[in-house]
Image (cartoon, helix red, strand yellow):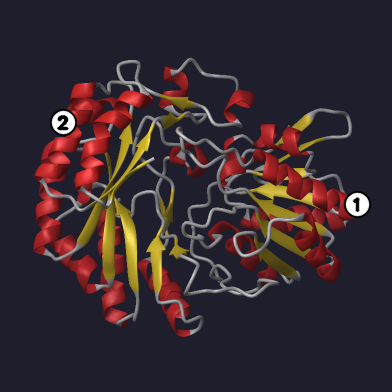
Amino acid sequence: MGRVLLISANTEKRPPVFPLGLSYIHAALTAAGREAGMLDMTQLEYTREAVTSYLDDYAPDYIGLSIRNLDNCCMQYPRSFVEQTSSLVSWVRQWNPAAAVILGGAGFSLLPQQWLQETGADYGIVGDGCSSIVELIDQLEAGKTPASVSGLMFRAADGEWRFWPPDAPEQLDQAYFPSRSGFLHSYDAEGKVRHNVLTKRGCALSCTYCAYPSLEGRNVRLRSPQAVAEEVEQMALVHGIRSFDFVDSVFNFPLEHAEDICRELILRAAPVSWGCFLNPRFFTAEFARLLKQSGCTEVEFGIDSGSDICLRSFKKNFRQGEIRTVVQLCREANLTFSFCLLIGGPEETLETLTETLELMEELAVQRIFGLFGIRILPSTDMYSYTGSPEPDELLHPKFFMSPELSLEQANRICRPYRERNPDWMFI
């Protein structure tokens, strides 16, 4: 039975984020009785020699390569991840041309054909991938040409592309949790790596720039609060991981589901601290109390702007009034919070940006993370708004900035606010 090596291609280290998608794939393979190991490139030297050393020792028949992001999403200092990922595939090819290379991950799923063309990998899996990779390898082991595998894409011998759209299973509770061990190298679980937990897939919101609905579907598929709490308990008690983030696109939608998870963690007295990403629309005093009591130490609100003009242009479902309310509720609950801003959207001007920054100072927001420019992604409103660029163009960094506000102007406006507020970051 063929051996599988899974590699997380992500190298971003501020902080290193646990490769959750890859760990789900590893758990699915081991549950199916396959031998699989993992490499996390945030933990290794990114060189051919380092990778080849593990390939020599482990001798895999199949290499699964997880691509988390297309690039660093930074308009000022853009850096594509295509070249480094292509290098990884090239190193594997030089080591053993017969080993099948399978791509996956959120970054891959955005532009699967482009990634396969660019890297020369054999196969790619769009979407969740847990059952798909098991089925693909089963078919390859049986000597078959793969077919009818959810999310599978490859170029057939006749030169034509084959693709089976990914399924979106309603049932997310599995007999296994994502693997927190199984790495072929030492892994600093607590000191360096930021661990994460997923409570749902899919997003029913309509933010103009966001690819979550196309990646995971618009139907929100929920894990049971009991399964989520059991995974958190296992992380703490078995693996010694006591700090993590819930990494749903929006943790508090639906609100009742988030509240039930908090109640389950409270019931189990889980010895953990955690953070999450929230929408201001679904936030109440009771929810703030539950967050605090269940171990939440920090929340981040993706408000994008403090101007109602810009909030409407982003198709946000809240306005400035809700932003003011969540600040008050967080302070009443003694809950640390921060805001994430996107600067330069379709209706951004000097006036709307100034309005946002003035509101942030008025509310005495301690921590802000601001991004200049909007990364254009396929299957989003921004993609259509900017004239639907060719998909090949989007494999490398491509951003939108409001014609009413240049990057230089935005930087100049933000500079004095950043100087007065040392925990405000703009990149």
Which numbered disc, 1 or 2, marks the residue closer to the eye?
A: 2
Distance of mark 1 from mark 2, alpha carbons? 59 Å
State which quadrant residue 345 falls in: top left
Is residue 184 toward the left or the right of residue 348 in the image? Answer: right
Residue 125, horizontal then vertical, whole percent: 67, 46
Q: Is residue 393 visible?
A: yes
Question: In this picture, is 46 found above or below 342?
Answer: below
10 Å neighbourhood of mark 2: few (<14), some, or many (≥20)? some
* Amino acid carrying mark 2 in the image: Glu
State which quadrant residue 322 falls in: top left
Helix, strand or loop under label 2: helix
The quadrant of the picture occupied by the C terminus is top left
State which quadrant residue 343 falls in: top left
Helix, strand or loop under label 1: loop
| In the image, farthest residue toward the bottom | 237
* Amino acid carrying mark 1 in the image: Ala
Residue 75, horizontal then vertical, whole percent: 46, 32
214 or 329, nearer to the observer: 329
148 or 329, nearer to the observer: 329
Is residue 295 toward the left or the right of residue 333 in the image? Answer: right
Residue located at (72% from left, 55% from top): 64
Residue 107, horizontal then vertical, whole percent: 58, 43
Q: Which residue is mark 1?
A: 98
Q: Which residue is mark 2?
A: 355
Tell me the number on the disc at residue 264: none
Residue located at (43% from left, 70% from top): 227
